[in-house]
Amino acid sequence: MKNVWEQIHSERSWGRYPNEELVRFIGKKKFSIPKEKRREINILEIGCGQGANLWFLAKEGFTVYGIDISESAIKKAEEHLIGEYNVKANLETADARKLPYENDFFDIVIDVSTIQHIPFQDHIKSYKDIFRILKSGCCFWSFHIAEGCWGYGTGELIDYKTFENVSEDASRNHGMVCMPSDTDLSKLLTECGFKVNSIEKHKRTYENQTKEVIHWIIEANKPLKR
């Protein structure tokens, strides 16, 4: 997986604008907070790529952190955020399954199509570590490719609903991709201690509505300590 994403990010630009559903989520949850107070809110993006979501979050006044498994992605994110957008982020090269942060530190952790690129059996490693670093009462938000999406079942099955060398365009050339059901993800998150608030389905068609790309939009909270 590391080699695949290092090649992608070293060879080309990848993602210039924030995920639209993420913008909606942040607007709904945090835009009521005055901008001068948003610096107190720590947001981590897992798999930040070249900074498409981070520059938006930083411009809106939040304190932002990002990790990516690709060193080239982190280098380009630093260049984009400072050189193009004049904002700062705390960036590190790291694996989504082992997060380099202390317990109870973040107010929001986001995953925009990153955890979907690790095997199903390793999702629980990421979810447990996200739970660990979130403050009590705070939120994990995820945009995750779904079972039945264009390309589902193609390539080599290497784990539960996890495929390598997917031959269709939706995830082609992105290494392994896990396409679980909403029930699969809800069960894993609950096992890790999360309260799943909602899982919505996001669909977009391609090729004159003959192909359908499906994602789960997940909101889950770390319950308040009693």
Image (cartoon, rainbow, N blue to C red):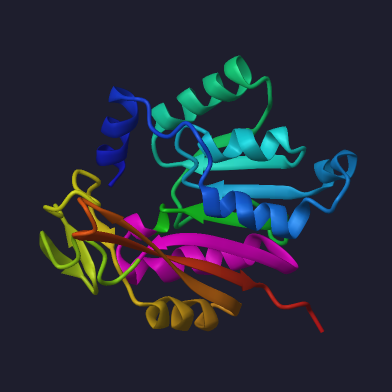
Left/right of residue 157 with respect to residue 37 in the rendered view: left
Look at the image and say whether residue 3 sits in the magenta stretch: no
Q: Is residue 11 above or below residue 196?
A: above
The extreme front residue here reads: 208
Left/right of residue 102 with respect to residue 48 in the rendered view: right
Residue 175 visible? The answer is yes
Which quadrant would residue 123 be assigned to in this image? bottom left
Q: Residue at x 23, y 55 (%)?
A: 176
Of residue 45 and residue 181, the one placed in the foreground of this image is: 181
Look at the image and say whether residue 118 sits in the magenta stretch: yes
Q: Is residue 207 above or below residue 187?
A: above
Left/right of residue 130 with respect to residue 8 in the rendered view: right
In which quadrant is the C terminus drawn? bottom right
Left/right of residue 114 with respect to residue 206 in the rendered view: right
Q: Residue at x 27, y 58 (%)?
A: 177
Which quadrant would residue 166 be assigned to in this image? bottom left
Which quadrant would residue 184 be assigned to in this image? bottom left
Q: How many marks?
A: 0
What x and y, as percent, mark residue 207?
20, 50
Q: Residue at x 61, y 33 (%)?
A: 55
What x and y, as percent, mark residue 213?
30, 59
What x and y, as percent, mark residue 126?
47, 63
Of residue 133 and residue 23, the one placed in the foreground of this image is: 23
What x and y, as percent, mark residue 14?
38, 32
Residue 102 visible? The answer is no
Stretch of the chain drawn in magenta:
116-145
